[in-house]
Structures are given as structure tokens and as C-alpha cells.
Image: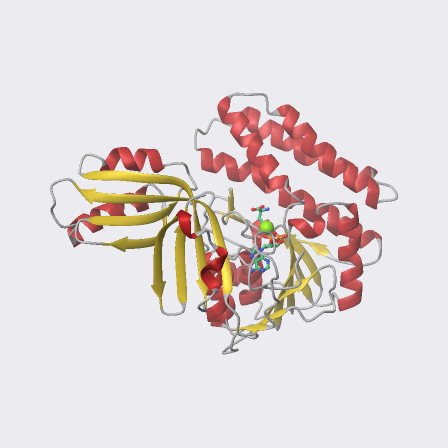
Amino acid sequence: MKVFKFGGASVKDAEGIRNVANLLQTVGYQNTCMIVSAMGKSTNALEEVVKRYFDQDDYTETINEIEKQHIEIAKEVFEDATDVSNEISQFFNDLTSFLRRNKSPNRSYVYDQVVCCGELISTKIISMYLNSIGLANEWLDVRDYIKTDSTYREGKVDWKLTESNIAQLPKTGFYITQGFLGSDPNYFTTTLGREGSDYSAAIFAYCTNADSMTIWKDVPGVLNADPRYFNDTELLNHISYEEAIELAYYGASVIHPKTLQPLQQKEIPFFVKSFINPLEAGTAVEKGQPLNPQVPCFILKKEQHLVRLSSKDFSFITEDKLSGLFTKLYQYQIKVNLMQNSAISLSLCLEDKYNNLEQFILDVEEEFKVQVDENVLLYTIRHFDANSDSVINKDKELLRQTVRETLQIVVKN
Ligand code: ADP
Ligand code: ASP
Ligand code: MG
């Protein structure tokens, strides 16, 4: 069995869907489990529905717009789009009636029941289209396979159950299923965290003992920097699992950070390839491969906040105080991307996905003096050399840290 993953960029429009069909015919699709994300930016649009719902704004217009976009794409790829259009409309009717009936004030629960539509619809359209042109496949509802706890928006995988569910799938055939989704013990939909479809593919690869896993991207593979922010990027031909997990952890968003662990455990060869040039080698992630070529790798994380906490009475920031602070950060779901301490101060570069920073600061202000630089940039340079920091504007530098082969610099935006 091999596992393929197609992300939002690969299926963002009719041309993209046709390209996926050609790609499958070129590289082969037998004994393949294909994981697909929502089309283009439709997850963002569905997030907007949730926001409007909780703000008590009109959300039906937004739903109609998303429905229209999907139906338009379907009309472009199908000769007769009646059946598929009906399927799409059915999904959106169900979504609207869910929101009308819902009584739960749990925003994360509602979020998962709404945003799942993106993946359910994209896989329906693609599965029906591939069947219609002779690429016979079976559509699976991933919620029957990937089981999680009830941590909505960040479902934790129940590996035992998931493995036994996926083990029931015959190892022959061509399956199409959704990335990003799972279900909890009550069969309510859960999601695995934004951009989580790479991780879903790794779960399937692990549970099927796949021969390989390939994620198809709009870039030639893993580059030594994100081409959106850096010039003259180079393709990394080979990297180790360790290198890949470090790059992903520091923010190289081409691979979701959770993807590597399941693959590494079973040493499943992992490829990142271009859906535009599928026959090119791309990047191979394999055991013990040295970084090839040996070049510095640059990662930029935006929307960070540099928070400097210092004691008000010149007392040391001791371990008990640190422990209290980290417990609070955990409770507020604020992620620490870098930390540096001195006798009476602690600097933290933080990521505030759930908009809790203000609350956190109010909470710690009684005990500490707090200075904040909001919306700063965090550069990470792996395998840095003497010239690597020329990418940053030194006048704007706020903090710098080197740990072995990794240099991190926090810079004003
Ligand atoms: P998907 O369509 O699977 O969701 P993503 O958009 O999440 O794909 O990932 C591909 C994007 O990742 C690229 O377009 C690129 O801008 C970005 N990216 C970030 N870091 C890197 C890197 N080191 N190498 C290649 N692409 C990168
Ligand atoms: N559609 C989801 C998102 O946009 C999951 C994914 O694309 O990986 O976050
Ligand atoms: Mg993505």
C-alpha cells in the first residue's frame, strides 16, 4: 500500500482536479490510499461561518457562497454535474440545519462540526469525478477510521482503535478519504489541528504499514526556505527524519510537524513532491540521510509576541516561579517558541493561536513587570554559517539565541 496526500492548493479549482487525475494516471494509483484536504481556502471560509454564528451575524450568505464555489468547480469538471451538485447541496443543507438546531455553546465543538464540510465535500467531488473517468475508487468516511478523544480542534489520536479500524481495510484497492478529520467516542467530528492533513496521511501510512508516503505540493519539495519569503531557495534532495521534524517544528510549514513521528517509528520512506512535475524526484525523507545539499535552512514564523517578564522586587525568577508561569501558559494554550532567562527576567517568544495573550498578561501582571513587543518575527536558521544572519535587519533585532546548529533571532516587524 502507498499513501498519497493532496492538499488544498492541489485541488483548488477544476484545473487542479484534472491535474490530480493526470498525475494519478502518470504515477499509478493501484493499492493507494489517497488523503485529500479541503479545496483551496475553504477551511478559512468555513471558519468565517463559525465566527459569524457566534457573533450572531448572518452566516447563511457565507454558506451559500461556499456552496456556489463548489458547485461551480463541479460543473467545470463533470459533463453532467446533477448528481454531484445534489450531493454538495445536501451537505450544506445539513450544515445549515445543524447550526439552526445546535444548542452547544462549546465553540470548538461547533467549529469541528462545521469545518469538516470542506474535506467531506472535496473528497466527494474528487472521488465521483475519478470514478466518472474510469479511475475506480472507494470513498471512505475517515471518521469511521481515525478515532480521537474529544479535544475539539486538536483531537488526540486513539492509536489502538485507529490501528484496528484501519487494519480492516483490504490492502488492495484505491481509497479516497479526508485529511484533518477524525471522530470522538460519540462519533462527533473532531479535527486534528489546522494543516493537519499531512498528519492524517501519516496516520494511514503507519496503520497500513505503507511502503511509502508522498505529499504532493505546489513546490518542488522541501526547500531550504519558504519561497514566499526568501529568494534563491534550493531544493533539499535528501533529509533525515530528524532534520524534517526539526524544520517542521520550527515552522517550515511545507510539512505539518506531527507528520514525522509516525513515519519515523516505522521508517516509512516519505517523499515531498511537486504536483506540477510529478515525475521529478522531489525531497526524500529517510532514515539517517545526511542533509543534501549541506546548506543553511531558513524558517520565518510570523505573528509572534515577545514577552519579557521581570521580578518587581529584584528577586530571582526561580524554578517555582517558572513552573507557575508555564502552567499558566499551558492553561491559556499559548505556545512558547523560544525562551531565554537571566537572574531577574524571562523573555518568551510566544504564539497566541487562541487570542489569550491579553488574559495571560493580566494574570501575571500582579507578580511580574511585563513588557510586550507584539507581532514580531521569529527567524530560525538551521546549519547557519557566518553569512546567514544577513537575511535580517540588524537594527530591528530584539533577541538572539544559538543552540548547536540552530540560530534563532527575534526581529521587530
Ligand atoms: P498544502 O496544499 O498541502 O496545504 P501547504 O500550502 O500547506 O500545502 O504547503 C506548501 C507551501 O509551504 C508552499 O507553497 C510554501 O510556500 C510553503 N513552505 C514553507 N516552508 C517551505 C519549505 N521549506 N520548502 C518548501 N515550501 C515551503
Ligand atoms: N483543510 C485544513 C486546513 O486548511 C487541513 C489541511 O489543509 O491540512 O487547515
Ligand atoms: Mg495546507
Q: Decide if residue 4 is on the left or right side of residue 362.
A: right
Is there any visible trace of residue 269 in the rendered image? no
Q: Residue at x 74, y 63 (%)?
A: 277
Q: Decide if residue 178 is on the left or right side of residue 193.
A: right
> In the rendered view, would you say 396 is above or below 202?
above
Percent position (x, y) of residue 40? 66, 44
* Quadrant housing residue 94: top right
* Front-lying residue, 122 or 354: 354
Q: Quadrant of the N terminus?
A: bottom right
Q: Decide if residue 51 is on the left or right side of residue 271.
A: left
Is there any visible trace of residue 40 in the rendered image? yes
Percent position (x, y) of residue 61? 65, 24
Q: Residue furthest right?
A: 79
Percent position (x, y) of residue 158? 45, 56
* Quadrant housing residue 58: top right
* Front-lying residue, 29 or 97: 29
Across the whole image, how many numbered discs are drawn on residues? 0
Percent position (x, y) of residue 313? 11, 41
* Front-lying residue, 98 or 378: 378
Q: Decide if residue 125 is on the left or right side of residue 283.
A: right
